[in-house]
Image (tube, rainbow, N blue to C red):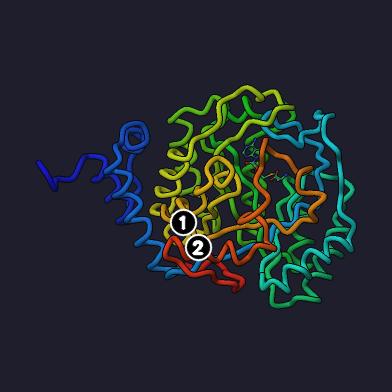
Amino acid sequence: MPGQKTSQMLIIDKLYKGQMPGKEELLKLLTSHGSEDEEYLFKLARKVRERTYGKAVYIRGLVEFTNYCRNNCYYCGIRRSNSNICRYRLSDKEIYNCCDEGYGLGLRTFVLQGGEDAYFTRERLCTIIENIKKKHPDCAVTLSVGERDYKDYLAWYESGADRYLLRHETAMEWHYNKLHPAEMSLSHRKECLFMLKEIGYQTGAGFMAGSPYQTPECIVEDLYFLHGLKPHMAGIGPFISQKDTPFASQNNGTLKQTLFLLGIVRLMLPDVLLPATTALGTIAPDGRKKGLLAGANVLMPNLSPVYARDKYNLYDNKASAGEESAQCINLIKKCIESAGYIMDLGCGDCIVK
Ligand code: SAH
């Protein structure tokens, strides 16, 4: 009958009302839905994001400051065993210059992301954070440097870091072990997330859509994990293969699946800061705009020095020009406006209503 809600729409309604559907229901929603269900989800996702954030889309300047990494994640192009990559690390001065340039462009959040690089000791990063905050006290500093110990996290927080991004990658133990070598563990990754939250960081978790071996059951666990953690930020982007990794010939995640997950996460965590990621912009030219229309409210253009951009190759063909480049802030603004939203250059803290 026309106008009648599908059973998938009823599950979406539950999410919209703040109820967590059962695992079987989520599984059904993930594995069987039509384009009408998608449109229904995205419409509600936009409604929910507008309730808290209005039409604002926040901009973060991403500084990829080192591609040295001690880890060997099977999916990631900057993994330790990749000898086909030219390693770099920015000097303190270069990092400050990136932030100064970003500040001049109007940005008020700087995300320092890198591989797990022991060169950046607790003290070195403290100094860098303190200097950025001293020069730009009206800005937020976000760190994304992987798993470190409690004392590091605490010292960086006390130096002024405000936020920390650490995707859990997958909440299923067996799947975690398919994506990572034995020296890494899901339990430690989760422990880090709990420490970060306890210290007081605005914390971000997340996972890749369509990562190798991922099943719908894995995604249900990811959603339940996010629901339990209640992070301030959630990073969800498609897996994209990188030619020098063990996953070189694996299929990429899709635009369609990623958008659907963004919509679900928006309903499940109404106030979360949710980026339309670079990976989404890489698999489809209009990926970012579609991400915004599915419930995302953050963009993270690249502020790294141009020479470093093609060296921070987590995956192949990573976009770093045009709308991915902070220098092209006018293109970013146009993209946001074409989706019916407004670029907000404030530091954009997580609002909990
Ligand atoms: N070392 C930091 C930053 C990792 S890079 C950390 O451990 O958190 C940031 C994110 O990029 C990762 O969390 C991962 O989810 C994503 N990523 C890595 N390789 C990728 C790939 N091949 N395709 C898509 N996303 C990838």
Horizontal side of residue 178 vs 80, given as left or right? left
Q: As shown in the figure, which amino acid type bears the numbered disc 2? A: Ile
User: Ligand 1 near label 1 (Cβ, under 8 Å)?
Assistant: no
Q: Residues within 10 Å of mark 1 (few under 14, many from 20)?
A: many
- The residue nearer to you, when weighing 215 against 209, is 209
Residue 336 disc label: 2
Q: Could you say where residue 69 lies in the image, as x and y percent from the top left?
A: 81, 39
Q: In which quarter of the image is the C terminus?
A: bottom left
Q: Residues within 10 Å of mark 2 (few under 14, many from 20)?
A: many
The correct choice, above or below, for 4 with respect to 30 in the image is below
Kind of element beneath mark 1: helix
Residue farthest to the left, as pictured: 1
Horizontal side of residue 242 vs 205, given as left or right? right
**Which residue in the structure is indicated by mark 1?**
292
Q: Could you say where residue 128 lies in the image, as x and y percent from the top left?
A: 84, 64
- The residue nearer to you, when weighing 125 against 87, is 87
User: Ligand 1 near label 2 (Cβ, under 8 Å)?
Assistant: no
| Residue at mark 2 to residue at mark 1: CA–CA distance | 8 Å
Looking at the image, do the residues carrying marks 2 and 1 touch, with CB atoms under 8 Å apart?
yes
Q: As shown in the figure, which amino acid type bears the numbered disc 1? A: Leu
The correct choice, above or below, for 161 with respect to 18 in the image is below
Q: Could you say where residue 19 lies in the image, as x and y percent from the top left?
A: 32, 51
Residue at position x 86%, y 54% in the image: 90
- The residue nearer to you, when weighing 180 against 112, is 112
Residue at position x 49%, y 36% in the image: 254
Residue 17 disc label: none
Kind of element beneath mark 2: helix
Label 2 or label 1, whichever lies nearer to me, is 2
Name which of mark 2 and mark 1 comes first in the sequence: 1
